[in-house]
Image (cartoon, coloured by chain):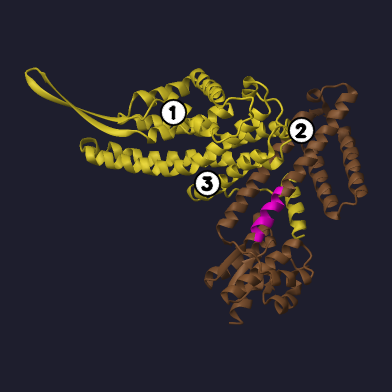
Chain colours: A yellow, B brown
């Protein structure tokens, strides 16, 4: 999955958090009786296609792009690229359409769970590391850049796991007998679910946006046409404006550090992995660092 | 009364070295409800050290790739198609030999030679591991796998570092200039050491409390504890004995 699509989709749950519960009543006559039909909906703030555009705009606007490119055109091209990818991926397309169409009939939560499961499935840090190793070979960026990238993928994994945990735990509350009949209770419980998801998104979005901003900037600086931005060949620091690169990088690392503290508490198992220091690479790192702080 | 931790203690936790001593120290801290701080200079040094080593390894691997690319040009085999056989280990030997020669000619410090030796061992062992039972191995695949493992290990180390730091309170201190001068005059070998000890001394003076600087660095710090205490008012100790310096004196 291309990084821009992966990044864009992982921000989509915010769209669901923006849903508002709404109850409408309809009275009609049938078989000589008066019937009252109560419809309960979660009204989306906008459609997903527009939401992706808003998200991309927020990211691109924080970058000082090379003059040869128009921010509007970059947004349009990336948006088009992401949307095309979504249309090609049947499972994803179906899920996003459901998320939009159901407009929160109780089972929208089911769709949200499926979306998180799908993102979790894509988010395979092992696979990303392999792609980053290839990217390192095809660039002159420092290796620490790719290590921070790997840290980001770990955060993304922690984010989807945390959201899944929340939604799975809270979804049954919305289906209990009382919540189904008492709208006030349903609204209250849905509000709690939204708040909890919002808190997680508040931690994840700054990292996601700064990560995407940094990558889009690097690609734009190393491209001569709009097409090149989507298909980079060699990423070189020689083509960037160093102060802008440093600004975006430090913004990314700061938000990464903040999010790490938050997600470390939520998914400690993802951050306390043991290393086999008998393996050549791990042993090399250990021997170098420890000898330089007078430990060997 | 409180402790200030040295870079050596933080990194020993990350690399799971001296586990028993550190666990005992952590139990002591908890038992006596003592405060444990990490100064901003230690935070910076620890992070910089990890990044510097990661980039050194990355740079060496990049140079190795360029070396092979040049060879692929001379043999007219595209880099992607270049296959390494067991006897190509001698190409690695030539590469590292050249690097050592450059370092020596440039009058670089021993640290660089040691670093390079460690990278050399890791590359050769990885090569032997990956070629075991095979006739040959594509160079591109070998390099990708080595780089991927370096990224993976570094990522875990950085996560462990964050985890270790989350158990301590970081404190932003600008060392008092007089104390910093005293520390430098003591001839603390690494430039960071003077900053760390002077930060602890600044805190002790400002708060009017006793501070123990906890370190594994015997060569420059622990073995010179009396001298440092006389000049800066901070006692230095190995984690194993740190708590006794606190409780026995009080």
Mark 3 lies on a secondary structure that is: helix
Find the distance from the CA under tag 3 to the CA under tag 1.
23 Å
Q: Dots 2 and 1: beta carbons under 8 Å?
A: no
Which residue is labeled 3 in the image?
A: A259
**Magenta segment includes A80:** no
Please state the extent of the stretch shown in magenta in the rendering. B41-51
> In the image, residue A201 lies at what x, y percent?
45, 40
Q: Residue at x 33, y 27 (%)?
A: A103
Q: How crowded is mark 3: few (under 14 residues within 10 Å), some or many (20 or more)?
A: many
Relative to B214, is A55 above or below?
Answer: above
Viewed as shown, does residue B163 lie left or right of B130?
left
Which residue is labeled 1 in the image?
A: A51
Foreground pick, A40 / B48: B48
Depth check, mark 3 against mark 2: the one in front is 3
Find the distance from the CA under tag 2 to the CA under tag 1.
42 Å
> In the image, residue A256 lies at what x, y percent?
56, 45
**Predominant SS of the magenta segment:** helix
Which residue is labeled 2 in the image?
A: B142
**What chain does badge 2 belong to?**
B
Q: Residues within 10 Å of mark 2 (few under 14, many from 20)?
A: some
Viewed as shown, does residue A112 lie left or right of B77?
left
Relative to A248, is B216 above or below?
Answer: below
Query: Same chain for the residues at labels 3 and 1, yes or no?
Result: yes
Foreground pick, B48 / B95: B48
Foreground pick, A198 / A183: A198
């Amino acid at each position: 999955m291309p990084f821009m699509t992966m990044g864009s989709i992982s921000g989509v749950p915010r769209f669901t958090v923006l849903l508002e519960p709404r109850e409408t009543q309809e009275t009609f006559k049938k078989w000589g009786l008066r019937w009252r039909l109560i419809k309960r909906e979660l009204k989306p703030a906008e459609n997903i296609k527009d939401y992706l555009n808003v998200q991309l705009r927020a990211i691109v606007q924080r970058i000082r792009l090379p003059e040869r490119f128009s921010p509007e055109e970059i947004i349009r091209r990336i948006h088009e690229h992401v949307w095309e990818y979504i249309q090609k991926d049947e499972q994803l397309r179906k899920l996003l359409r459901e998320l939009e169409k159901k407009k929160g009939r109780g089972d929208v939560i089911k769709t949200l769970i499926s979306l998180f499961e799908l993102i979790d499935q894509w988010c395979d840090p092992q696979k990303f590391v392999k792609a980053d190793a290839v990217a390192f070979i095809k660039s002159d960026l420092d290796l620490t850049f790719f290590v921070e990238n790997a840290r980001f993928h770990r955060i993304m994994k922690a984010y989807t796991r945390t959201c899944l945990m929340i939604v799975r735990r809270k979804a049954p509350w919305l289906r209990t007998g009382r919540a189904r009949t008492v709208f006030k209770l349903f609204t209250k419980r849905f509000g709690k679910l939204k708040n909890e998801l919002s808190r997680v998104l508040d931690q994840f979005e700054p990292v996601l946006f700064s990560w995407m901003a940094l990558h889009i900037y690097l690609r734009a600086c190393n491209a001569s046409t709009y097409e090149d931005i989507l298909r980079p060949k060699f990423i070189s620091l020689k083509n960037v404006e160093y102060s802008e690169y440093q600004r975006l990088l430090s913004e990314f690392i700061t938000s990464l550090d903040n999010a790490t503290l938050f997600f470390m508490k939520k998914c400690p198992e993802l951050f306390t992995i043991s290393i086999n220091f008998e393996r050549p690479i791990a042993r090399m790192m250990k021997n170098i660092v420890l000898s330089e702080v007078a430990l060997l | 009364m409180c402790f200030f931790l040295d870079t050596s203690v933080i990194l020993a936790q990350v690399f799971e070295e001296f586990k028993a001593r550190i666990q005992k120290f952590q139990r002591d801290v908890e038992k006596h409800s003592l405060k444990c701080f990490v100064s901003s200079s230690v935070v910076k040094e620890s992070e910089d050290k990890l990044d510097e080593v990661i980039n050194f390894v990355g740079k060496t691997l990049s140079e190795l790739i360029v070396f092979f690319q040049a060879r692929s040009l001379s043999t007219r085999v595209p880099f992607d198609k270049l296959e390494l056989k067991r006897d190509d280990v001698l190409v690695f030997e030539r590469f590292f030999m050249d690097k050592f020669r450059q370092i020596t000619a440039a009058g670089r410090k021993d640290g660089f030679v040691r670093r390079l030796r460690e990278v050399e061992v890791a590359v050769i062992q990885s090569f032997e591991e990956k070629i075991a039972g095979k006739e040959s191995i594509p160079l591109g695949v070998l390099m990708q796998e080595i780089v991927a493992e370096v990224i993976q290990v570094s990522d875990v180390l950085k996560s462990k570092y964050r985890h270790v730091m989350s158990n301590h309170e970081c404190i932003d201190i600008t060392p008092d200039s007089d104390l910093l001068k005293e520390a430098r005059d003591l001839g603390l070998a690494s430039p960071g050491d003077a900053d760390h000890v002077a930060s602890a001394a600044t805190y002790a003076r400002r708060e009017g409390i006793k501070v123990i600087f906890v370190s594994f660095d015997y060569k420059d710090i622990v073995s010179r504890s009396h001298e440092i205490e006389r000049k800066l008012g901070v006692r230095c100790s190995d984690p194993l004995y740190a708590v006794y310096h606190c409780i026995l004196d009080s």
